[in-house]
Amino acid sequence: MRVRRWCAATVVAVLLSIGLAAPAAAITGGEPDGNRHPNVGLIVFYDADGRFRCSATLVTPTVLITAAHCTSGTLGRTLVTFTSVIADQPPSGLPVAADPSVGYTLEELAAAGYLSGTALTHPQYSDFTDPRNWNDVGVIVLDRPVNGVTPAPIAPLNQLDRYAQPVLNRTNFEVVGYGTEVRKPESGPQKPEPMSYPLLRRYTTSPGQKLTSQILQLNGNPNDVRGGGGTCFGDSGGPVLLGGAIVAVTSYGYTDNCRYLGGYQRVDITVVQDWLTSVGALS
């Protein structure tokens, strides 16, 4: 499976999206989500490099919010499912596009029993080249509304500014995404590493570490007694929740084993909320 890697500032940021053909990882620490966050879904899509997956959250009956690097350059439709447990063991059971060069079509996703939508990317997404204009946010506009799932609210403008230091370090945020935890393998060197299965929605808590005009940074070390862990490959685009509202989406990480800091795109800022309003994700 291909893992997307980008240069963020002066460090190599390991982006939290992965393909579906080989090992993947997600929440480090934490536990299976069950029906705790039924509005957090798995999205699967094709681009020129193959098939990938991310996480996303329903914010209106027809729109999900996710990361821009999960929407930029996608081919065809994006698959959406809110099923909490995708597969305990391989294969995942997720459909393969008849023609990967054009991606999923509405008809084949409907025939397979999945929701489908069109990916849109923030027009000022800097592709991780400008930390002052990160804008790593995108949306999936569904082809038909979702029934029976209550959308999650997006935090009001500048909500996180109230959590500047020293309050930030004392604040726990909830993070949600699809994939499996980082854990020790059943055989061989007993070093925690990303695992493929089970593929399911998980959640945990992470304490605040740093806040900028664009980015919320959280401590994702599961050994930190203040929280339960953090995010990893496959959690990209998943929500960061505070008081039940989305304040950010998972954007990037710093290590291959995802047991350090995580970076999250703020969605409570003007440049993001103006765009979300324009695409019908925020009223």
Image (spheres, rainbow, N blue to C red):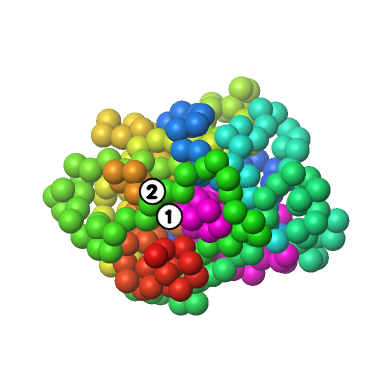
Query: Which element type, helix, strand or loop, lies under badge 2?
Result: strand
Q: Could you tell me the amino acid type at mark 2?
A: Val
Q: Are marks 2 and 1 in contact (CB under 8 Å)?
A: yes
Residue located 36% across and 41% down the image: 174
Query: Which quadrant of the rendered structure holds the C terminus?
Result: bottom left
Q: Is residue 77 left or right of residue 167?
A: right
Magenta segment range? 48-76
> Which x, y percent locates residue 201?
54, 36
Q: Which image quadrant for residue 30? A: top left
Q: Give the class, few, some or many, for how many residues have Cα within 10 Å of label 1's Cα (few <14, many ≥20).
A: many
* Residue assigned mark 2: 240
Q: Which image quadrant for residue 275? A: bottom left
> Which x, y percent locates residue 146?
58, 49
Query: Which element type, helix, strand or loop, lies under badge 1?
Result: strand
Q: Could you tell me the amino acid type at mark 1?
A: Val
Q: Residue furthest right?
A: 98
The circle drawn on residue 12 is none
| Earlier-in-chain disc, 2 versus 1 | 2
> Which x, y percent locates residue 129?
45, 73
> Is residue 69 part of the magenta span, yes or no?
yes
Residue located 62% across and 26% down the image: 188
Marker count (numbered): 2
Residue located 80% across and 65% down the image: 101
* Residue assigned mark 1: 249
